[in-house]
Image: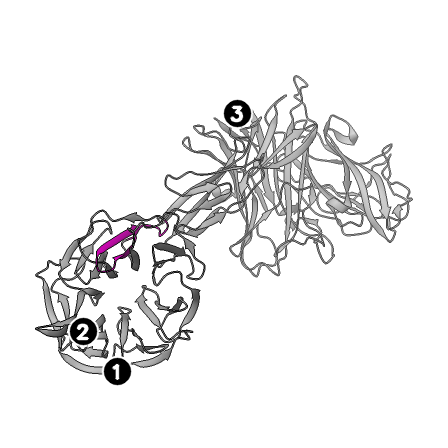
Amino acid sequence: MNVRVHRGARASSLVLPLALAVGLGAACVDGGSPAADAGAGVAISVAPLSLPGIVDACYDLTVKSGPGGTGSTVWTRAGVCSQGYGDGGGAITYVGTCDASTGADNSVQLVMTSLTDEAGDAAFVNPCPASAPCTKDAPCSPNEDSPVTFDLTVMRPARQGFFDVGVSFDDVFCSAKVDCSVDDGGAEAPIALLYPATGGGGRVPTAIFALACTAGANAATELYLSDVVVTCGGTPHAIPLSGPAGNVWSEASPPPSPLLQAATFRGLEALSDGATGDPLNKLYFNVALALDLDALGGPCTLSATATASDGPFETPFTTPSGSAWPLVHVSVPLVATETASAYSCTRNPLGDLPEDGVWVGYTGLDGAAPFAHRARVDGGAVVVEDAVALTERAVTVLAGASHTFAATGGTPPYAYSVVTAGGGSFAGAVYTAPSAPGTYTVRVSDAAGGHDDAVVTVNPGTLFVAVGGTSAFTSANGSTWTAASVQPTPPSGAGLGDVAYANGLFVAVGGVAGTSAYVAWSADGDVWTTAATIPATRNFTRVRAAAGVFLAGSSAGTAMSTDGDTWTQVHALGPYVAISGGAYFVTFYQSTCGSSGCYADVYRATVAPPTRPTTGQWDNITHFAGGSTQVNGVATAADGHLFYAAAGGLLRRASSGAEDTTIASGGFTYIADDAATPRTIVAVTDFGQTVYTSTDDGQTFTSHATGAATTGLGRVIWTGERFLLTADSPSTLYESADGLTWTSLGPLPGGAVTVKEH
């Protein structure tokens, strides 16, 4: 597709700001043509009209291709009223186009059709009736500004202008520009068009983006635009394009700062092919906007992308793939600095390079460009439609969580789908994220075949899993619980006693007391699978996880697994296990005293996780003769000291396991550390509502109330981000970031809990 930049094509534009109020009779002269004004550029003056209480005035506008109202009609627009296109008091602004192909001046005709005051229709002497419209000639030359001003009140003439360059896309002809100033006798003068939406005041400096295209004689020209965005200080503001033409905002619906006002203008030019007389169906779409220079917040840039076509694209609102489709790009700095006192953009005609601010580019042959808006002719009127669009283009959710999407525009009904394989699922508009973290694409499609995509980032979510009896439960916050949809299936008489998380898996253990073991695993806590290989042992009472391995203990031995499905026995004793300080621990208690008496032992593996120890790779580091001390848990300090939660007290031992210090007397049931340097260590008592906590690597411990409503505290674990503590009767879950201050998360369904953190 060839692109030719024209400097003499029929695409020049006119700006028609009309400052109109009511009062005395008109001063139209020479058969209705207003007297010439001596202001900058080409302007028209009409003697002032003044009358208080005016709330609206309406006009018909026509542009002719010749001077004095002669030639063919370029375009006409009826019912241009100040309520929609101006200040609501009689003044209006309108942006249109003219015909540069004749080489002669064009003319602008204005007919005043109505005037309204607070009581209704106002009586007035019409200065510009349909029988004798106010007419003004204006040059329409490419690369020239053609401002036309009708002032029907004594006021400073408005200044405005356009600069035109055209580009031909095969038989599609377009012009585009962004102007912020007009040539005023060789100097750049601001374009003052729009009135602030709020607070009153006169016209303010205005920037104008203009686009006009024809796809040729008898063609169904369609314009396509992205959002027209003003970005100030890094904050984007999209100008609404699909609402009624004219002013975008009002006193009742104010614009976002720093915008003062914006207005849209669109129409169909009544141009025809000079050779055949066939209509050219040339559409124009113009956007004017004004900024509050005292509230910018940083530099401001205007950006947009546009194109045109002969009829609709095969995929609605999207250029064809496999075709290098031409695009008009806009990226014009409006204001250079936060403290600027004026626009810096001057005039920006269509060029060839990005540094021109307005330039022509192409889609790649392997790509297609989607657009947000379309302007087309429907029943003789120009309508603007929005493409189907998701209201959120970037969403972050936790793994397994849900998010409800919404769409606008296009042709309902909408259908939602996941584009990326394994990226989750939809039920209607409700998206459910997969368990695997990652970045996924989702899509909404409309009934016309259009679509819009969004990117979903799935983060590893916080997921609590609790087990008890024969059931498992999940929670996103530790307070609201949901029963697993596919529960573990322990045999009759078996229960679940503990649960742990590592390696992307939850593992629950239990069994029939004193008889058999049971293990189930789950990737999401919701769907559980019974382990394929379970050692022939008694029920597992505890499972711990670290470094990607699981260690489960029973009174008949200790087993290990990396996947929760296949287990290997690694020690003949148990039942309590721990993984702490980069070491495996197994504790054994001989509760029935035989000929050798009662005793307790603590074993530590001679290999570190994740290496699997054999039954011969364990050292007996502590032996309690007489059976007076059952060790229920082990934690380690950064300096290598060991801490035992034992039936005989909280004990501090040397790394060799040799006796060192009894920190506190009484029964201790569980202990956990945070693996930091220095360690925070929390030990649970069996004689009250308190825990013992050290924040200095076990040098000192202090007791802390948990606020539990029961004297029966249960288990404590470190999740990687927090300590979790369970309490019995009623079963309740507590959390603490430091082991000192505890917060209740609410009732706990089951006696054991673990969590997958972010």
What residue is at 51 percent from the left and 55 percent from the top?
Answer: 234
Q: For mark 2, what is the residue?
A: 640
Q: Which of marks 2 and 1 is nearer the N terminus?
A: 2
Q: For mark 3, what is the residue?
A: 170
Quarter of the rendering containing residue 8 = top right
Q: State the separation of the CA atoms marked 3 and 1.
A: 92 Å
Q: What stretch is highlighted in magenta?
A: 504-526
Q: Is mark 1 on a helix, strand or loop?
A: loop
Q: Give coordinates of residue 292: x percent, y percent.
A: 63, 57
Specify the amino acid type for callout 1: Ser
Q: Give coordinates of residue 590: x percent, y percent.
A: 15, 70
Q: For mark 1, what is the residue?
A: 665
Q: What element carries label 2?
A: loop
Are there few (<14), some (14-19), or many (20+) residues within 10 Å of tag 1? few
Q: Which of marks 2 and 1 is in front?
A: 1
Q: Decide: marks 3, 1 in contact (CB < 8 A)? A: no
What residue is at 29 percent from the left and 81 percent from the top?
Answer: 701
Q: Give coordinates of residue 574: x percent, y percent.
A: 18, 64
Residue 139 visible? The answer is yes
Q: State the separation of the CA atoms marked 3 and 2.
A: 80 Å
Quarter of the image that includes the C terminus:
bottom left
Are there few (<14), some (14-19), or many (20+) residues within 10 Å of tag 3? few
- Nearest to the observer: residue 65 or residue 40: 65
- Would you say residue 693 sits in the magenta stretch? no
